[in-house]
Amino acid sequence: MRGHGPLQLGGLVLTLPALAAIPGGAITLRDARAGTVREAVLAPFSLGRTQLTRAEWHLVTADGGSPPAAVGLPAHPVTWFQAVEFCNAASQRAGLAPAYRIDGRSVDWDVASDGFRLPTEAEWEWAARAGSTAPVYGELAQIAWTAADSVAGPQPVGLKRANSFGLFDMIGNVWEWCWDYADTARYGDYRSLRGGGWDDPQWRARASVRRGSAPDAVLEDVGFRVARGPVGLPGAGAAQGWSAAADRERAAVKGPRPVGWTPLRGL
């Protein structure tokens, strides 16, 4: 990675997130609510080997202050807005073009940017499965912190076994924000979360399970990991299994709305 080197804070050396090279491929994604199946074809990209840590968060967001306690823990709780703001700040620190244009609550992704960003859901699931078609990439006790471990909170990253792409904690520990909307027809501007957390039961700790929440929600069991990689042409509104046009189409609910649905407007 080009740009700034490590930062020394009180004897502790902090660096920007270490990334793993993820090969391209194709993955089938299922939407249980809509009853649909689609295939996403992915270009190669890079993804954080671990969930973003408190130390990495501090490196980018602090102004030379003392590092936080328990620096190896994942950064949490983090809102979706905070995650995309962090990605832009990390890009600037590393001398990269920011991936996001942020205007209040409006966030646009430049798919041609090489800056830090959140993975799409398709990228996340492809990376989590790492070639496996099973619900998890190994025995759950060996790869994930879940309710079965009876821990009181997230644990330091990288203590359990990595998958075959060299990624740790893709399942369990903290849920991870993705770029995509969860469901623009039903949940408005909610964004997607993947992976499960330390207090989730086994049935929720799977590569295919998804959750959504408001982009400004403060959730104790939520963090993220960063991605990088230009995956489309400048100005394109689609990449890596995500499409702005599809978001608008899903939000265009015709006829009476089911109870509780809040379609996203103004896309």
Image (tube, rainbow, N blue to C red):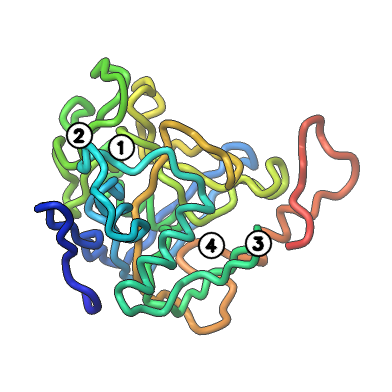
Question: Residue 70: x, y in percent?
Answer: 21, 37
Q: Position of residue 8 (x, y in %)?
A: 15, 60
Q: CA distance from mark 1 to mark 2?
A: 7 Å
Give the spatial CA distance, label 3 vs label 2: 38 Å
Residue 71 x, y percent position in the rendering: 22, 43
Dot 1: few (<14), some (14–19), or many (≥20) neighbours within 10 Å?
Answer: many
SS at badge 4: strand
Is residue 157 depicted above or below 113 in this figure? above
Q: CA distance from mark 4 to mark 3?
A: 22 Å
Q: Residue at x 26, y 43 (%)?
A: 68
Q: Mark 1 vs mark 2: which is more N-terminal?
A: 2
Three-letter residue code for mark 3: Gly
Mark 3 or mark 2, earlier in chain? 3
Q: Is residue 15 above or below residue 11?
A: below
Which residue appears at 24% of the width and 49% of the height? 66
Q: Which residue is mark 2?
A: 143
Q: Nearer the viewer, mark 3 or mark 2?
A: 3
